[in-house]
Image: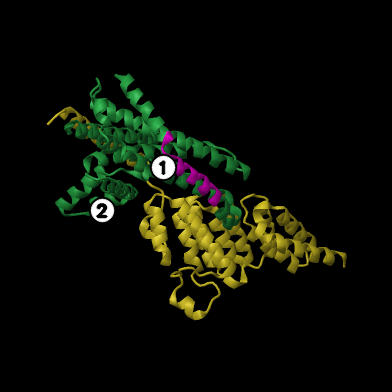
Amino acid sequence: MRRPELLAAGLACLMLAGYAQSRARVSFASPFPDYSQLVFGNDRLQDMAFLSTGFRRLAADVAWIQYLQFLGVRDFGRGGYATPEELESGVQYPGLMLRTLRIVRLDPWFRQAYLYGASVFAWSNATKDPQNAVKLLKEGIHYDPDYWMYHTFLAAIAFKEKDNFDEMAETLEKALQHPDCPAVIKSILANFYKAEKRYADALRIWTGLLADDNAEEYHERAAGEIVRLRAALKR
Amino acid sequence: MIEPILAIAGYTVKEHVRNRVFQLVYLFMAVLVAGALVVSALAQDQRLRMMMDSGLAGMELIALIGILFVTVNLVRDESESRSIYLLLSRPLERWQYILGRYLGTLSAIGAGIVLMALVHAGSLLFFGWRPDGIYATALLCAFGKIAVMGGLALFLSLATTSTPSAVAFTLFLWILGHFSVEISFLVEKAHNPFVKGIGWLVGVAAPDFAFFNFRDFMDAAITPSGEWFAWLAVYAFGYTLATLFLSSWIFSQREF
């Protein structure tokens, strides 16, 4: 055997790497949910392909797009998220909770997914389930305890459940000031104001949405609502 | 001692820059960034996040493909064309040749990553991104991963008999590297000493890429400490050096 010192040096470096590996693991444990906590549905091959190549956040992004398509045009994709009870009951969006959990378990700091999911569960008539909204927000708080928006949303849901709509609106108004606030919650509050005949407040929110470059999907609707609300204010 | 290494690294960089496959790979990156612009529009108000993630993932993937396909043929091509005789007839140690070829390849790939990052960061800035240190750290970690993969690909190209087998083994270890935490978990839970031993061996021999995916912490409330980064650097350096020493050892056994 020629140059045995190279073999020895290689093995020594491998041992050094092994030591560094164990020290790194001691200094910082992975904060991500275990694989056993992940929610796959029939998209497991897609998610596992991303995970096994180290693209965890991208997996959450693709799941987010699929989630928006499901909510927007009821594109069920590969499915596999709905329980038999949900399918039998004929709900409009079966398996919505598991679809939301799929995203936030892939990326537990995907704030928009928690907020959007909680908004949909708390305020949308088609998907109303405040318990799921609270469950989602609590999971968000577990990973991101200092993010105030989760607490604000929890408070707003609590006020709503107690029919204390003025307090709910006030709490949501605080959330609206933040750039992270999902557009869906703005539209929900605007609709609430309209139903309460607070047209000026509703107009203010729709005008803000129309000017928001990140809420392009609401622009068409905002333009229509602004025309109707201005007419209502003139009456 | 350093001069021959630098000379070999220099001609390796020139060789790669002139390589058409190499150029096509970076052209593909431009297509990928353009594709990310289109796909990210579907993410509504999360467009910037989607562009960030797909860009970082794309860069890593392109760099991986680049280093993998270039490295597995790095020594093999020169051996087959017999131009290696010319080099080894000079006062040059074989380990210097291996190190020079590796450093040249890594430099070329590193330059490619910088180029891709500029294009990517430019597109992000256009959509209102505010540059931060996390992006640079994520890129640095991705580069660490590529450095480890380059060493591994070089070692496997010398340890195996054909290019496809070297590529297959390297890709297999790349995937295995993302399950290092799970391998450790299986080792902990195993009762059979043989299974435990095999698991431990695989855990040490396969790269641990769980460390390098810093981009997953981009919006995280909790981020690794400085100590963690220090161990990460020791790990990347130690593992890469191990592959280079072992590659040099295998290469020194060859008869030309």
Residue located farthest toward the bottom when viewing the structure as drawn: A88
Q: Quadrant of the C terminus of chain B?
A: top left
> Foreground residue, B97 or A67?
B97
The image shows residue B30 at horizontal and vertical percentages of 52, 45
Q: Secondary structure at mark 1?
A: helix
Looking at the rendering, which quadrant does residue A129 occupy? bottom right
The image shows residue B71 at horizontal and vertical percentages of 33, 39
Colour basis: by chain
* Pair 2/1: label in front: 1
Q: Secondary structure at mark 2?
A: helix
Judge whether B32 appears above or below A231 on screen: above
Give the colour chain B carries in the figure. green
The image shows residue A87 at horizontal and vertical percentages of 48, 77
The image shows residue A166 at horizontal and vertical percentages of 70, 62
- The residue carrying pointer 2 sits among few (fewer than 14), some (14 to 19) or many (20 or more) residues within 10 Å by Cα, namely some
Q: Numbered disc 1: what chain?
A: B
Residue occupied by mark 2: B186
Q: Residue at x 39, y 32 (%)?
A: B15
A63 within the magenta span: no
Q: Residue at x 30, y 52 (%)?
A: B182
Residue type at mark 1 is Val
The part of the chain drawn in magenta is B17-35
Residue occupied by mark 1: B21
Does residue B13 show up? yes
Instruction: State the separation of the CA atoms marked 2 and 1.
Output: 40 Å
Residue located farthest toward the right when viewing the structure as drawn: A235
Give the colour chain A carries in the figure. yellow
Judge whether A85 appears above or below A206 on screen: below
Q: Numbered disc 2: what chain?
A: B
In primary-sequence order, the first of circles 2 and 1 is: 1
Residue type at mark 2 is Leu
